[in-house]
Structure formats: structure tokens, C-alpha cells
Image (tube, coloured by chain):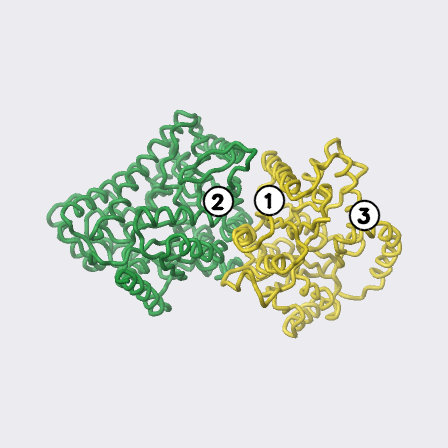
Chain colours: A green, B yellow
Amino acid sequence: MSETPRQITLDEWDRAYERLQAAGVPQPVYGGPLGRHVADGDTRLLKLRFDSSLAALQLWNFLLTEEDRLRAARDAGKKLVGTMKDLGTVPVMAYSLDNLVAFYPDGAWWIPCVMEVNSGLLQIADSLGIDESFCPVRAMLGAFVTEAHFPIPDLLTCSVGATCDDFSAIAQRLNGLGHPILWWEIPHRRPPESDEDGVHLPGGFSAPRSQIQFVKAELERVAIALQDLAGRALDDEALARGIAQANHVRRLLAKLRDAAFTATPCPMPALEMLIAEMLAIHFCSDREETVVVLQELLDEVNRRVLAGVGYLPDQAARVFWVNPVADLQVLNLLEDCGGRICGTEYLFAHALDPIPLDVPPMEALARMALADPMAGSAVDRAARIVADIRRLGAEAVIVSRIPGASHCALEGEIIGEIVREECGIPVLEIEVPPLTDAVYPSLRTRLEALVETVVNRRSR
Amino acid sequence: MKTIVYTCPYVPAEWIAAHGLQPRRLIPQPVEGTSTIPRLEGLCPYARAFVNDVAASKDVDGVIVTTMCDQMRRIFDLLVRRIDVPAFLLNVPSTWQTAAAQRLYLDELKRLGRFLVRLGGREPDRKGLTDAITQCSIGKELVDLYPVITPPESLIGPLLCVMQQVRHSLDAESRRYAEDARGVPIGVIGGPLMERDQVLFRVIRECGGETAFDGTETGYRTVRNLDSRHLSGNPLEDLAEAYFRLPDPSRRPNGEFYKWLKDKAACRDVRGLLLHHYVWCDKWHAEFERIKEWTKLPTLRLDSEGEGEMNSLRVRNRIHAFVETLR
């Protein structure tokens, strides 16, 4: 199927799946027709277009069966750790212990989109005083109340400090509902002062050594809780193994991003690439299978690059995308408008960078945690975006605002200002709610205008 | 004397004063016209007004912002890009139950001290800090006595003697006032109030209520009064401990705020609570339902865009109706 990549609908995928079955093509245990997820309420899938490769089918099925895996893990006697907000640090620690499974309750922020607001989660959040002025991650509260989207974890951790207010407030509300939370502090990252010893961080940032030591001590508190839950020691050896596995995932993803963002024609659509990036945060509750899924996707992309096949004309506008989208459909829309993704910063760039191996494991994790784009200033974040724009040759930037998110009020202004100054390319700021149907025409117009601007600038 | 402005209650005025600098807690006006930061969707009006007010001030030699809320943390980025005033971002931990978090706050105060010295402040010694604590504590006693009125920090030094003299008369007046009060006792809680929105307390009174306590961020809740007679050998540590323990909903967990609220509500016999916050203030907004659940007191939530709505007919009507239901 890789010879002629196409974006196909759910119906087309289900018909293709029947042919695959008839041909005896093996599928993983979580495999099956994508259409079955619609029966579970994931009706947004009916409006999306998917890549036509087997690798993409596996990716989607892996993503949409996470709840089953969590319940199976609990049935098998494993303990579940809900790692809120930290985006890629505590999961590495938890997966270093083989009887723990970490997941990301914040991932519930996509449920209102995927289930087209039919899940009732936002209404529950409303009833708890967390209304639409908050980020869509408020759906997580409803998911805890209904227990219908993930099992209640045995341990909940949450990073606070230099995080967004929405999530901090929502997590506190959750705590007030009777869910104990182990809070750990991530301080605002700052550059070292002249009289301080500085440390280089993944992603090109730096921080005073005192901040690294502080975060390391915080993570050691988390480690103690994980050890207690697992009933076994989380020593440096186990952590080092966990870091090596996480780095394997990150290397695969780096290769995938590099190929997908730079090859012409575009070998993999934006939507599948977003899902692939999300796997690096917490491995979608199965680290080993994450490796398999990403490897399949990378193989598919490499085959397409070699064959010179892909999506969109060669002249497609090369767009760098900032922040994840609450409505997945918007990434399809960008491609409809003649744009392609050639770089992303979905708020977890630090979870894609290799974890340092030249320092003790806990310190390496502390450095990684402190490299979180959310922990530092928007100026830092913009600097990283500018470096990536130059490396990847982006011709425009879209800053996608998350409705209600405290960081979105100002960072777009700063990122836009710096990108224009440094790169001289157009920047468009849009807001993407969980369902964009009502604003779809205006969003389309704005994206089309951006693509037109890019094309016009080429002829100057 | 150089003036250092701040607005977050986790910035100890005593520490600035100990450096020989004038601390000024800036309670902003909703500055319009030549704005440094434009009106942006999702931006807290208080944070915006603070920066615009700093930009409009002629006599500011340094500004301190903290990380206690994400909007202020992020507004620091714009502040340093658009305003030519030395600025400092003080990292105030959200967590408070560990010794490490408290140590981090103390270390941040020391780092702030180095910033103040770079601005021309003097290295504070023990006596200097103790003197500053003494002076500030007398100023703050006025707030204890008369919770609705916050004395300007600028009065603390020059009017120290006068304030000591008026203290006793104010004390008497305060007691007499409490005895005469006929209004329904209401506890006011919430985030900071801009100067113009302090009219809220008068509106409450005019609507038949009485402010039993001011638990807003610019009110009594955030006043820390250190008794200089009981300082240890390290007054900076005493200062850090006192400020670090300010009860606020932004702390994680925030149970200390609820303990404070329960104590205040009980000792002042409040019949209802009024929660004010500016739009996009997630931390206060998110607590509203929990406050109702936890205190079991009727609670009115007023959110505003910083446009002087506290004196509007609509807000008056709402407060009036609220007070009526509490009679």
C-alpha cells in the first residue's frame, strides 16, 4: 500500500481493512478496523482523513486502545501511575520498574474532540466550576469522575511551579475531590548569573546548577513514591536502562521527524506525525510496542522517500507549527489549503531530545525536565523555534492557541515578534477549540491566506 | 532614594527596605491610552495594568515580578522587552511542604538581594534588616486594626511616629465601629484588587453589608507582621519563613488557605463570602465551587475585566440581592 500514499476516510479504511484480512495480513492484538472505535463514541474519526499505510493503521489502533491496555495491565497486577503535566520525565522513571505502567491523564484533553463533545466530560467539569474559560484539559476532571476513559491510577503525580495555571488549578480541583496527588516542583528555568555555575541542557538552554540540584531532589521524592508503589528499588542501574529505552524511542522519532519534515514530496501527513510525537511523552502505556509502532512508521516513510512518493505538490508552503491542536481535523485542513508541516513545537520538545548519558541518571532526568519549553521563558522557546525554522527551512509559522490556556495569552505575541525579527517570515496566530466546525470557514480562509502569502513571497 | 515596585505579596517589603531602597507595592490603575501591552484575549487585566502602570511611572528604578501566577511569570518576558527598567523575576515555589522548597525561596531572596545591590542598594546587615522589619511591622499594624484600609507603603518610614500615635485612636475607633456595625458580615476573598476596584468595600457597605475581613490578595490575608523582638539570629530566615507561609489558593496543595478561611469565617461570624477575581484568573476561578463546598457558606462570585465594573449598577444589584438573602 505504500507505493501510492493517499489520505483516506474511515469508510475507505474499513473497506481496505477487509481486503487486508482476506489477504491474511497479520495485525497486532490491538489491531482491527478503525471503524470500531466510532461505535465506542469516537465520532470525530468520521471527519478525519488518514494515511493509507499499514503503519498508520497500526499507529491509530495503538493510540485508540490505550484504555484497554491500562485495564489489562491492572488485571495483570501492575500498578498504574498517572503522571500529570510533566510531559516525559516521570514516565521514564516509572517504566524503569517493570511492574509499573505510567500514563498521561492530561491526554483526556482530546476526548471532547475525538468524541465530538458527546462524552459529557466538559459538562462535568462545568458542574465542578471549571468552565470554558479553562483549557480543554478540564475534560480530565470529567474522566476522573466517570472513570470511563481510564482506570483511576494507584499513584498520581503532578509537576507544578513553572507550569500553566489552568492545569495547576484543575489538578488542585481534582485533589479537592479526594484524589491524593504527589506534587513536585519545577522552578522557572533561568540562565545562570555571572557568579553561578551553569549547566547546559538538552535543547540548547542553560540553567544554574542549583536549579538542577533542586529538580533532582524533587525527582528523588517521586522516585521514593514509585519504589514504594512497585515494592522494589529504583536504583541508578534500573534508571539507566529506562533512559536507554526512552532514548531509543526518541532516536526513532528524531529520524521520523527529520525524514517527514524535510523530504519532498511530504512522506507522511501532519496528523499521523502529531500522534507519533505524542507517543514519546508516555509511550501510550506500552513502551515496547511504541518502539514497534514508530519503527513501522519510519520504515514506511523511508520507503516513500526512496520511491519519491508522498503528499502535496513540491511547492507546498512549508509551515512550522507551534502548540498542539485541540481539534485534530485542523491538521488535515492545513494540507487542504496547500500547506505542509516542516517543523513542530508541540510544547514537549524536551521529551524528544535525547536524555544526557554523561551524568548520573537522576541528574540527566532533572536536566531534561528543566529543559521543558513550558518551564522557561517564551523568549527561550522562541529561540529554539527560530533555530528549528532555520534548520528545516520553514517559510511561515502558525501559533495555534489553546482556548483558555494561561500561557497562550502572551507567548504568541512574543514568539511572533521574535520570529519576525529573526527570520522575517509571516506568523499567523489562530485559536483551535476542541471542535472547529463552527469556525471552520474562517480558519480555512486564514490558512489559505497564509499559504498564498508564502507563495507570493517566493516570487519576489 | 530609589524606588522598587512590586505587586506580589510574596515580595517582602522589609527586604527591599533593608537595602536602603524604597519599596512600593504598586496597586495598578487600569491604564489605558499609551499601553505597553495591548488588550489580548486571555490576558489577565491586573497583570496587564501592572505592566502598563510601571511603564507609565516616571519614578520607578526597578521592578520585581514573581512566578506565583503563570500570567505574571509570562508578562515578565514582555516587560523586559518593552520597558527600560531593570526587572527581576522572583521564583516563588508553588509547593511549600518541603524544606527544599523553603530553601529555594530563601535562596531566591538572596538572589534578589544581589539584584538590589546592583541597582545601588547597600548590602544589608542584621541590624539594617531588623530595623526595616520593625518599621514595616508598625505600618502594617494599621492594616490589622482597620482591615479594609491598606496604608500606602510610602507612609511607613516618614510617618512612623505619627502612625504610632494614631494607632491607639484608630484602635478605639475600630472597636467602636465594630460595635455600631449593623451590616451583614461578609468575608471578601479573591485575587488582587486594582485601585479603582477597592470601591467594592464601599459598595458592600452601601448595599447593607459589612466587610468582616479582607481576604483579597491586596488585603489583610497577605500581610505578614513580624515581631522584631522575637527574631532569631538570622532575620532573613525569619522573614523568608513568614512570607513563604502566606496562605494562598495558588499553593500546592492549598489546604493552608482553607484553614485560614475557616478560622477567619468563624471568628468574624460571617454569613456569606464574596469572591472577586479578574477574568482569566484560573487559580481563583477554579476555587469557587470548592470554597462553597468547603465552607458551606453562600458565596457570590464577581469577575471583572478591570473596567471599573465594581461600581456598576449591575454589580451593586448583585451585591444588594446577595446581602438581602443573608439577612
* Left or right position of A344 against B89: left
Residue B90, label in figure? 1
Q: Who's the residue at 32% across and 60% down the image?
A: A330
Q: Secondary structure at mark 2?
A: loop
Name the foreground residue: A202 vs A139. A202
Badge 2 sits on which subunit?
Answer: A
Residue at the disc numbered 2: A375
Q: Secondary structure at mark 3?
A: helix
The mark that comes first in sequence, 1 or 3, is: 1
Residue B138, label in figure? 3
Residue B194, label in figure? none
Badge 3 sits on which subunit?
Answer: B
Q: Residue furthest left?
A: A23
* Left or right position of B135 against A379: right
Q: Is residue A433 visible?
A: no
Residue type at mark 1: give it.
Leu
- Percent x, y for residue B61? 65, 50
- Percent x, y for residue A133? 50, 61
Specify the quadrant of the image occupied by residue A100: top left
* Badge 1 and badge 2 in a common chain: no
